């Protein structure tokens, strides 16, 4: 009797495992369909997205160069006035962080 009980437990757990796998497969299919729907809705033109990213990177690079140049000038002004960069920032009402 114990052997038949163990076989029943094994087949029941196999059935649960099979049902769980079916649920997972259905969920995967559902997610794949959602991805396809979103790609159609949003457009999957990766070339356009890459152009936008490159443009933003270029603009960010230009911004950082301008900011670096401004910080150099603020540093020189602080030396000329024999004060700190922080005081120059405060006097000119400039932010201290990024």
Image: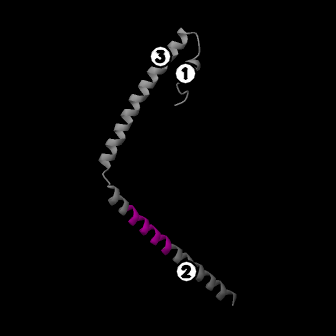
Dominant SS in magenta? helix
Query: What residue would you read off at disc 2?
Result: 15
Q: Could you classify mark 3 by the number of other residues whose Cα lies within 10 Å: few (under 14), some (14-19), or many (20 or more)?
A: few
Report the coloring of the rendering. one colour
Asked if 58 appears above or below 12 in the picture, the reply is above
Q: Is 73 on the left-hand or right-hand side of 38?
A: right
- Which stretch is magenta? 22-35
Q: Could you classify mark 2 by the number of other residues whose Cα lies within 10 Å: few (under 14), some (14-19), or many (20 or more)?
A: few
Query: What residue would you read off at disc 3?
Result: 73
Q: Nearer the viewer, residue 43 or 97?
A: 97
Q: Which mark is residue 89?
A: 1
Q: Secondary structure at mark 3?
A: helix
Residue at 35 percent across and 38 percent down: it is 54
First in sequence, mark 1 or 2: give its number. 2
First in sequence, mark 3 or 2: give its number. 2
Q: Is residue 33 one of those drawn in magenta?
A: yes
Q: Which mark is residue 61?
A: none
Q: Nearer the viewer, residue 61 or 7?
A: 61
Pair 3/2: label in front: 3
Residue at 41 percent across and 33 percent down: it is 60
Q: Secondary structure at mark 1?
A: helix
Asked if 89 appears above or below 30 in the picture, the reply is above
Residue 8 position within the rendered picture, expressed as x and y whole percent measured from the top left: 62, 85
Residue 12 position within the rendered picture, expressed as x and y whole percent measured from the top left: 59, 82
Asked if 87 appears above or below 2 in the picture, the reply is above
Q: To which quarter of the image does residue 90 belong?
A: top right
């Amino acid at each position: 009797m114990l052997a038949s009980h163990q076989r029943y437990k094994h087949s029941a757990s196999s059935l649960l495992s099979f049902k769980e796998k079916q649920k997972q497969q259905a969920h995967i299919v559902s997610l794949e369909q959602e991805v396809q729907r979103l790609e159609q809705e949003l457009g999957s033109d990766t070339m356009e997205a890459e152009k936008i990213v490159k443009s933003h990177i270029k603009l960010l690079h230009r911004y950082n160069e301008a900011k670096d140049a401004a910080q150099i000038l603020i540093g020189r002004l602080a030396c000329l006035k024999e004060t700190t960069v922080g005081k120059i920032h405060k006097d000119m009402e400039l932010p201290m962080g990024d």
